[in-house]
Image (cartoon, coloured by chain):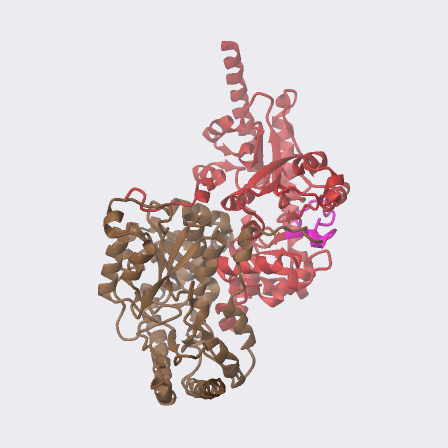
Chain colours: A brown, B red
Amino acid sequence: MHNYWTLSQRAAAMNPSVLREILKVIERPGMISFAGGLPAPETFPVEAFARASERVLREQGSAALQYAPSEGYGPLREAVAAMLPWQVSPEQVLITTGSQQGLDLVAKVLLDAGSRVLVEEPTYLGALQAFAPMQPQVCGVAADEEGVKLDALHAAVGETQATAAQANYTANHPRFLYVLPNFQNPTGHSMGEARRVALVQAAQNLRLPLLEDNPYGELWFDAPPPAPLASRNPNGVIYLGSFSKVLAPGLRLGYMVAPKAVFPKLLQAKQAADLHTPGFNQRMVAQVLQEDGGNFLSQHVPNIRALYKSRCQAMLNALQCEMTEFVAQGMAWNKPAGGMFLWLRLPPGMDAQNLLPKAIAKNVAFVPGAAFYANQPDVRTMRLSFVTVDEEKIAQGIALLAQAIREAVRETGREVQAK
Amino acid sequence: MHNYWTLSQRAAAMNPSVLREILKVIERPGMISFAGGLPAPETFPVEAFARASERVLREQGSAALQYAPSEGYGPLREAVAAMLPWQVSPEQVLITTGSQQGLDLVAKVLLDAGSRVLVEEPTYLGALQAFAPMQPQVCGVAADEEGVKLDALHAAVGETQATAAQANYTANHPRFLYVLPNFQNPTGHSMGEARRVALVQAAQNLRLPLLEDNPYGELWFDAPPPAPLASRNPNGVIYLGSFSKVLAPGLRLGYMVAPKAVFPKLLQAKQAADLHTPGFNQRMVAQVLQEDGGNFLSQHVPNIRALYKSRCQAMLNALQCEMTEFVAQGMAWNKPAGGMFLWLRLPPGMDAQNLLPKAIAKNVAFVPGAAFYANQPDVRTMRLSFVTVDEEKIAQGIALLAQAIREAVRETGREVQAK
């Protein structure tokens, strides 16, 4: 059957997720996995969903099970608009089948083959996968502990502010910059107030649209993060949100807030992609949000924050305890202010990818950071999720990871001696 | 903010659905609408869904609400494979967010900008919308009451069977032919056994992959349709199925059966598009299918068939009664053997698009057929859905439609006289 099926050129750019491949390997019993990107299932409000499901089917079964508008269920669009910390009209809210679909729709509407798109380095792997089918040229912009660096951004845009102000663009002007300002995946980094102000100003000066992805913003430990970028320039930012981390991911419910200049095309792309997000799920979530007099999330999310904070602290304590010897050799990690992930950098000369099999042999897993880089990976990095493993297992797992690193260091030492 | 957002070239090819625009207009009270493409909501098994939802949340709440594999929920993939009338491995089944998503994924994986893709003329509008973002060259192939005509197909491929046998393709060889063999949307036409045999043979000779869309196949009135095209050449056909017409569309549950040559890329495209179809919905449907000792559908679907058959008959009776005078002038319609739609062709010189405002003024609506053509529309055609309006209203609506046509004919007469 040679050549019976001709694949598109874009198919060559599609790849199985490294993460999914890793996750398959580490599903064996006994494994302590810091590799997943899953929220802790014990936080899912199963009872509230059961009540909502029963009520939706009883009171509006036919409507919930019928075809529905592509924009989304009206009351849910209104609830989303009301929930966001800036003035948002429900007309600008598009309900998506998870916020992953938002990435697919934005890519379709804003990216041509060869278009430049800027991403923080490192960034969310799923975004790179969602953009890839549109065949853009993805350009990683260096980031520090607050996210994208402005000098690197200016360099990447390849224009001075002066020429940008003259709207003197090349065809190569990036279509947008993709950023996760809150507790970023994979690093757990967050952007402070000053950087947000400066980034939004720079983007306006450069006439560079922003795609702001905020799945983790509600998962802060001690204080909420600064206001979203979208609230500072609503006409220059597409904002993606999700119920996956504050309720549960299995309903696949996300949303997008988009300026009028792009909303109609995003809606048309949505309609072509799957007609609409399941109306039953939208009504269930709208119903759950209405519980406790409309305060369900403000009752529920603090429990998630408390759990994730204590697990994060357990991981920080374990690292402090187990990794002291490597700190002197140049190991470092951050102290997340929220979210699900911590970013660890091995001592110079080490490669997290090479370390992984040794760690798995000891029944502990992580994701090597290289997968999250669009361009030049930092092979010393790894992502550690602290949310799905209990505190005792976190301590055990970090101790096992330290053993694996110790062995790898010894081997590296032997290799160096042998040379 | 001129030029702040640069849209992709493909965005220009996206258009709001004509249908959705019409459906908005006709949602006013008192309107008898034959325009919708919705199944009859009184057939939705609301009670079975309520039982399934309660049980899924009680027995496997956390798993149902967690992230899940992109391929789909194992037991549902197995149930789909077992349900299909040919030997299908669950490994070849991909669960999709409605079968509309299947069209999006196939377009991504098989179409480059400028690729030729063949469709029956007329065809499902949503397929044209799903293909458009990949910027193919869509080529309509003439069809008769059994679907695509083989001489037109050979002409469209632009190759004789002899040269095709030598695998002497141009870069312009069509990537696939999209067909709905059962009770087609919009025409209600069905492909007989002989045409299926001939089409599958011709496609093999032409080395032309087929995309077979089968949302309506179970909705037969007196006898099931012949076996699917995919069953006759599984390696040469991607098959799309759906639970929207046999259970309910609001859960957005479809599936795809794809040959090994394309499955991995379709799966990667699926993962990038929305990670996975809601696991809760997949478990609910798997649970419903298991009711009545696994015979839920074979108990439930006959009720839908009976309802749709009687409504189809009511429409045929009403047409017979009201439209006699126009038959002499060249009006014609088909007698569907299943599905949801009937295809009516106005007398020569008339245009269904022009008729629509007159019909709406009389409180009856339909969809002008022109929207369903990829290339040269037949402006005399219209699509009439017979499934969402009861028999009494069908008779009233067809009588109103006849009045509207009568007026239009008189006006056309006056215009001709005036010239």
Percent position of residue A279, x then y: 47, 55
Point out the image quarter for the N terminus of chain B.
top left
Percent position of residue B342, x then y: 62, 36
Residue B170 lies in the magenta-colored region: no
Residues in magenta, as a range: B217-239
Question: Is residue A248 shown to the viewer in this render?
Answer: no
Q: Please tell me which residue is depicted at 60% across the width and 64% down the height of the picture.
A: B286
Residue B233 lies in the magenta-colored region: yes
Mostly what secondary structure, the magenta segment?
loop
**In the foreground, A202 or B384:** A202
With A213 as the anchor, is A412 left or right in this view? right
Q: Is A415 rendered above or below residue B389?
A: below
Percent position of residue B251, x then y: 52, 57
**In the foreground, A129 or A393:** A129
Q: Is B144 rendered above or below residue B117?
A: above
Question: Is residue A205 shown to the viewer in this render?
Answer: yes
Q: Please tell me which residue is depicted at 67% across the width and 44% down the height of the picture.
A: B182
With A284 as the anchor, is B259 left or right in this view? right
**In the foreground, A117 or B332:** A117
Q: Is A256 rendered above or below residue A169?
A: below
The mark tally for this picture is 0
With A191 as the anchor, is A405 left or right in this view? right
Percent position of residue A6, x then y: 62, 50
